[in-house]
Image (cartoon, helix red, strand yellow):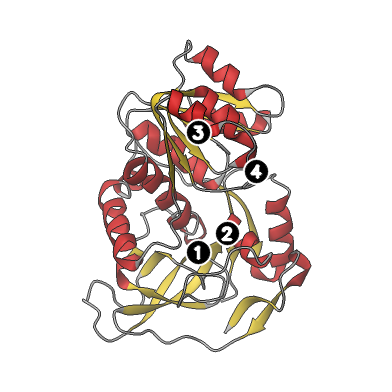
Amino acid sequence: MLAVHFDEPGGPENLHLKQVAKPSPGDGEVLLKVAASALNRADLLQRQGQYAPPPGASSILGLEAAGHVTELGPGCQGNWKPGDPAMALLPGGGQAQYVTVPEGLLMPIPAGLSLLQAATIPEAWLTAFQLLHFVGNVQAGDSVLIHAGASGVGTAAIQLARMAGALPLVTAGSQHKLQTAAKLGATAGFNYKEEDFSEAILKFTKGAGVNLILDCIGGSYWEKNVNCLALDGRWVLYGLMGGANISGPLFSKLVFKRGSLITSLLRSRDKKYKQMLVKAFTEQVLPHFFSEGPQRLLPVLDRIFPLTEIQDAHAYMESNRNVGKIVLELPQ
């Protein structure tokens, strides 16, 4: 089968397609023929040599995929059959023509969505769902600050926060991205390139600050984050796009706010946790992709690249121009 490959860490120019052995499903696994996968920041970090896959996971890039079940391994419970369309959360391996998946990490594709749209859901939406509910303990009436509000996780988190009865506030780097966030339900948006978002948020919340922060930036935002955190607020750190180092009195400022700093990664969680997350998401959230009306959830697909243009896809994500997800279409 064809798969995305790089011989050594580096820039997008190191990526190419390579013929590799097609995997076989093990106990409790299914083989998925991949129609589409989506690009994530983790793929860029892995390509750069900064984010190794978890032990036992495929070294091929790709944390999510959509396609059709083609083979069942021994010990499967009978929930899936060959030919079924499905989407999957993966620790790696999605950017190839076939990938093996524990059957508990497969989800049905909502009616009316294409396989390309479905590929935008697993990693981004499960991350956002986990951050809000499993980690951040979002409550109705909470104000939630979502950094990178026009990203895949950001566009999902806006909608899920709304569904939970919370008030999503976002940061983004352009007016177009803020307008997209507003259309998805963001209560307010702040252009971090043009204003101090922490001061703007304090003004917007009349000095109260935000109850929950979903932060994929890290180091460069620490002071502004703690500045606009409400008393007893929760700050969930799940990425380090703004660096890992800080310089200053983070702890004293956080203690003064009685704030909680919580870190979270989804990729390195064990299979049992991921299956629990997928089950909860499938029961509580997936039906809202099917339904019509104000509670309907919408995947946001920015751009589709054929897998042969994998270098261009990585360069496009690195340019930070995308609004929503970047999808890779696999050769069939």
Label 4 – label 1 distance at C-alpha: 22 Å
Q: Which mark is residue 42?
A: 2
The answer, for residue 311, to whether it is visible in the render is yes
Tell whether label 1 touches label 4 (CB within 8 Å).
Answer: no
Three-letter amino acid code at disc 3? Phe
Residue 132 is labelled as none
- The residue under label 1 is 63
Query: From the viewer's perspective, is residue 230 above or below residue 164?
Result: above
Q: Quadrant of residue 21?
A: bottom right
Relative image position of residue 103 (x, y in whole percent): 31, 72
The spot of residue 257 in percent (x, y) is: 43, 24
Relative to 65, residue 177 above or below: above
Residue highlighted by disc 4: 242
Within 10 Å of the Cα at label 4, are there few (<14), some (14-19), or many (20+) other Cα atoms?
few
Q: Which residue is mark 3?
A: 251
Residue 294 in sight? no
Q: Nearer the viewer, mark 1 or mark 3?
A: 3
| Element marked by disc 4 | loop
Q: Secondary structure at mark 2?
A: helix
- Total numbered circles: 4
Which tag is nearer the camera, tag 2 or tag 4? 4
Say which label, 4 or 1, has the lower sequence index: 1
Question: Of marks 2 and 4, which one's residue comes earlier in the chain?
Answer: 2
Q: Are marks 3 and 2 in contact (CB under 8 Å)?
A: no
**Residue in the foreground of this view, choosing between 138 and 95:** 138
The answer to whether residue 309 is left or right of residue 151 is right
Mark nearer the N terminus (3 vs 2): 2
Gap between marks 2 and 4 measured at Cα: 14 Å
User: Amino acid under label 1?
Assistant: Leu
Residue 157 in the image: x percent, y percent?
Answer: 45, 40
